[in-house]
Amino acid sequence: MAVPFPGKNSRVSQGRYPDVKLAEVRHFIPELRGALANDTDPRVYWKQRNSKSGRATVRYCCEQFMAKRSSALKPGTIATYESCFRAHLFDTFAERLVEDISLGDWIDFFDKKSEKSRVTSGAILKQLKTILNWAVRRQMISTVDVLQLKASDIGSASKVGSRVLTFFECGKIIRELDKCRVTKTVTNAIKACLLTGASMSSGLQS
């Protein structure tokens, strides 16, 4: 958005469409007018504003992503995100701000996940990068080093397999699902998909 300032026009970036709607941008106009009234360059004001109040925790970024983007996502995708968030990300680094978490801290976190499953570690990183890249575009946070990590650095990407799970393996997965803190709807949908081979979206809609 271009904002007139004595001697030049200051361009203030407030995110990209469709992550940021025009109606949301309009809410910031009174703030920027106030900055102009105080002879403050809007770009300087916006940077200071975000450095003070725009910092957020991992959980906050996850919750905001779901609040803003869930209407555009498929039910199966929503279930996948929510399951990952609750199991791996909501309690990650507790109340620490995302921008205060070092790359070394993230590597230690993913190394522990890789000890149990390299594929799971890679999947978590993929979800995390989706959330944090979205938060950067929304100017909730500044860019962070963890976005430079690749799945091969801390785990491995998931692959399409051709092997069918045994009944013993299905039973083990179901027992672990019963221990998770996900909703009954999601748990039952996953169980139904395991037993029938249906897709997650079909399971959630049934």
Image (cartoon, rainbow, N blue to C red):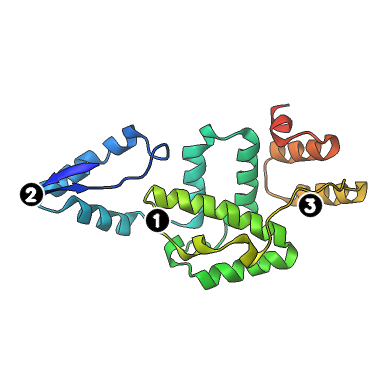
Identify which amino acid the numbered label 1 is placed on: Ile
Look at 16% across and 49% down and name the residue there. 35
Q: Which residue is mark 3?
A: 176
Q: CA distance from mark 2 to mark 1?
A: 29 Å
Look at 35% across and 54% down and name the residue there. 54
**Nearer to me, 7 or 35:** 7
As drawn, the label of residue 6 is 2
- Mark 2 or mark 1, which is nearer to you? 2
**Secondary structure state at the residue bearing disc 1:** loop
- Image quadrant occupied by the C terminus: top right
On the image, the x and y values in percent for residue 128 come to 55, 54
Relative to 160, does residue 157 appear above or below in the rendering? below
As drawn, the label of residue 12 is none
Look at 55% across and 63% down and name the residue there. 149
Relative to 93, does residue 201 appear above or below in the rendering? above
**Side of 30 where 68 appears, left or right:** right
As drawn, the label of residue 141 is 1
Q: Is residue 131 visible?
A: yes
**Nearer to me, 94 or 195:** 195
- Mark 3 or mark 2, which is nearer to you? 2
Look at 69% across and 27% down and name the residue there. 205
Relative to 118, does residue 38 appear above or below in the rendering? above
**Secondary structure state at the residue bearing disc 3:** helix
